[in-house]
């Protein structure tokens, strides 16, 4: 954990009620179950997907934006630092999976800080490694807020565009269903080939133009009710470019951050109601090099904060 990043305002006059994240976060250790942050400082996947690089600096920017947010909950908050992907992306994803599965095994909720959406393959593997410790047959649902399916076939390289195709292949090899649903898909940002792949893999999705809360709740319910554990991933390019300019591929239309937040709270409630365990989440594609006045980082931090609130 880098204390230089976790800096912010101190309202000493308000005591414990005035505390902010930078005052309560502590290095990941053997402490009681809480929420643990883990970064994947990588834009290797974005480069391999022919995107705009810079997301390797995303985790640090996201922590800076989180630092000053108020600490409303009582749950312990940990920071396990970053895995870096300077050259070997697969090795960094595997290192992330190893670190992430240990965090999950200690009973923490894991929040991944991207980095490009290659964090998706890392988070998926972290969850699967953790589930393998008890019951490898347990079903893991993936709920992706994204303008893109990220279902490209590695050709030949895995990238930020392939994580959920990799997850689908893993499920096929392990004879498990691929439980994947997307909210915010842009018809204008995915080729016919990608829609065909989504159909082949029985992926349920909501187009950006069709997004409303009843439709999202019903999609989330169908996903959550058939799985044992949930992984939620938010690709910041699902938001309008005006809200999230600091990404590789800003959205011309996008869905509103308020709607995404409503969906996150709905997902937490639906998990509670159906006995599904929400294991982990991540925020992908924050690219500070293209951000304007830190607005993408602020939005990303708000989403992390709302996930923490939604979990109650
Ligand atoms: Mn994505």
Image (tube, rainbow, N blue to C red):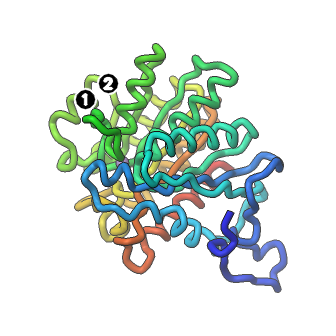
Q: Which residue matches tag 2?
A: 201
Tell me if residue 228 comes above or below residue 89 in the rendering: above
For the residue carrying disc 2, how many other residues have a C-alpha within 10 Å: few (<14), some (14-19), or many (20+)? some
Give the residue displayed 54% in from the left and 67% down from the top. 60
Asked if disc 1 and disc 2 are in contact, CB closer than 8 Å, the reply is yes
Q: Is residue 285 left or right of residue 113?
A: left
**Residue 157 x %, y %:** 31, 39
**Residue 25 x %, y %:** 73, 64
Residue sitting nearer the eye, 67 or 96: 96
Callout 1 secondary element: helix
Q: Quadrant of residue 133?
A: top right
Give the residue displayed 39% in from the left and 56% down from the top. 43
Separation of marks 1 and 2 at Cα, in angstroms = 6 Å
Q: Is residue 260 visible?
A: no
**Residue 41 x %, y %:** 50, 57
Callout 2 secondary element: loop
Q: Which residue matches tag 1?
A: 197
Quarter of the image for the N terminus: give it: bottom right
**Residue 297 x %, y %:** 47, 69
Give the residue displayed 27% in from the left and 56% down from the top. 51
- Is the CB atom of the residue marked by disc 2 within 8 angstroms of ligand 1's nearest atom? no
């Amino acid at each position: 954990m880098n204390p230089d990043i976790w800096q912010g305002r101190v309202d000493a006059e308000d005591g414990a009620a005035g505390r902010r994240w930078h005052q309560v976060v502590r290095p990941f250790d053997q402490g009681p179950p809480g929420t643990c942050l883990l970064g994947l400082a990588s834009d290797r996947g974005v480069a391999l997907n022919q995107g705009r690089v810079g997301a390797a600096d995303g985790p640090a920017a996201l922590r800076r934006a989180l630092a000053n947010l108020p600490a409303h909950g009582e749950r312990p908050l940990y920071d396990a630092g970053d895995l870096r992907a300077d050259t070997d992306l697969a090795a960094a994803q595997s290192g992330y999976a190893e670190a992430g599965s240990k965090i999950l095994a200690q009973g923490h909720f894991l929040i991944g800080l991207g980095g490009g959406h290659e964090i998706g393959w890392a988070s998926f593997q972290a969850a699967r490694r953790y589930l393998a410790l008890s019951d490898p047959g347990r079903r893991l649902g993936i709920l992706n807020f994204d303008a893109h399916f990220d279902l490209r076939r590695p050709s030949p390289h895995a990238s930020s565009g392939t994580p959920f195709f990799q997850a689908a292949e893993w499920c096929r090899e392990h004879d498990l269903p691929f439980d994947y649903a997307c909210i915010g898909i842009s018809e204008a940002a995915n080729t016919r080939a990608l829609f065909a792949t989504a159909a082949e893999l029985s992926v349920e999705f909501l187009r950006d133009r069709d997004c409303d809360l009843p439709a999202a709740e019903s999609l989330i319910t169908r996903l959550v009710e058939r799985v044992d554990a949930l992984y939620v991933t938010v690709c910041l390019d699902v938001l309008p470019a005006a809200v999230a300019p600091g990404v590789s591929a800003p959205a011309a239309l996008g869905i509103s951050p308020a709607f995404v937040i409503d969906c996150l709270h709905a997902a937490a409630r639906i998990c509670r109601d159906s006995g599904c365990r929400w294991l982990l989440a991540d925020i992908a594609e924050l690219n500070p090099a293209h951000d304007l006045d830190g607005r993408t980082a602020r939005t990303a931090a708000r989403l992390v904060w709302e996930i923490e609130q939604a979990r109650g």
